[in-house]
Amino acid sequence: MKTNFFLILAFWLLPALILSAQNGAAPVSQAPYIEVVVASDRIWLLPEETPQGEVHARVLDHQGKVVLEKTFCSGAESWWLDISTLAPGKYQLHLTSGQREYFERHARKRSL
């Protein structure tokens, strides 16, 4: 009787174990997507939803050197980076979530 009970229990649990092994671990919650808007002097970060915790932003130049770094709290009203001091060139913006954005800063044309 005990043997039958264990066999029935094993056959009942086996498909559930196989399916969970095939599907892998439960998905890890991802950080919300952050829309990046590059203006002439600022980069605006517009999250779809309020992220939990802090978001670290780093701007790297074409050589991979960090030229600007800022941390944003979830309670901040506006999220932006001042890029007015950056030299003209190509840059990358790296966010904590792994999101990367590429942008180019152009020299300002001055006219009188």
Image (cartoon, rainbow, N blue to C red):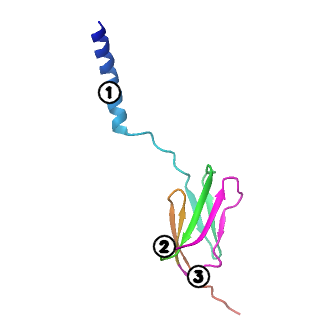
Disc 3 element:
loop
Residue 95 point in image, percent of width and height: 55, 61
Q: Mark 3 belongs to which amino acid? A: Ala
As measured in the structure, the alpha-carbon distance from the residue carrying label 3 to the one carrying label 2 is 15 Å
Provide the residue designation for mark 1.
15
Provide the residue designation for mark 3.
87
Left or right of 95? Residue 72 is right
Give the mark nearer the N terminus: 3 vs 1: 1
Q: Quadrant of residue 14?
A: top left
Residue 109 point in image, percent of width and height: 63, 88
Q: Is residue 23 above or below residue 17?
A: below
Residue 84 point in image, percent of width and height: 65, 77
Rendered residue at 37%/34% (across/down): 20
Rendered residue at 51%/60% (across/down): 99
Disc 3 vs disc 2: which is toward the camera? Answer: 2
Q: The C terminus appears in which quarter of the rendering? A: bottom right
Q: Callout 1 environment at 10 Å: few (<14), some (14 to 19), or many (20+)?
A: few
Provide the residue designation for mark 2.
64
Disc 1 vs disc 2: which is toward the camera? Answer: 2
Q: The N terminus appears in which quarter of the rendering? A: top left
Q: Callout 2 environment at 10 Å: few (<14), some (14 to 19), or many (20+)?
A: few
Instruction: Please provide the residue range marked out in magenta.
Output: 64-89
Q: Mark 2 belongs to which amino acid? A: Gly
Q: Mark 1 belongs to which amino acid? A: Pro
As measured in the structure, the alpha-carbon distance from the residue carrying label 3 to the one carrying label 1 is 60 Å
Seen as rendered, the residue at the extreme top is: 1
Kindly check if marks 3 and 2 are in contact, taking CB atoms under 8 A apart as contact.
no
Left or right of 62? Residue 49 is right
Q: Callout 3 environment at 10 Å: few (<14), some (14 to 19), or many (20+)?
A: few
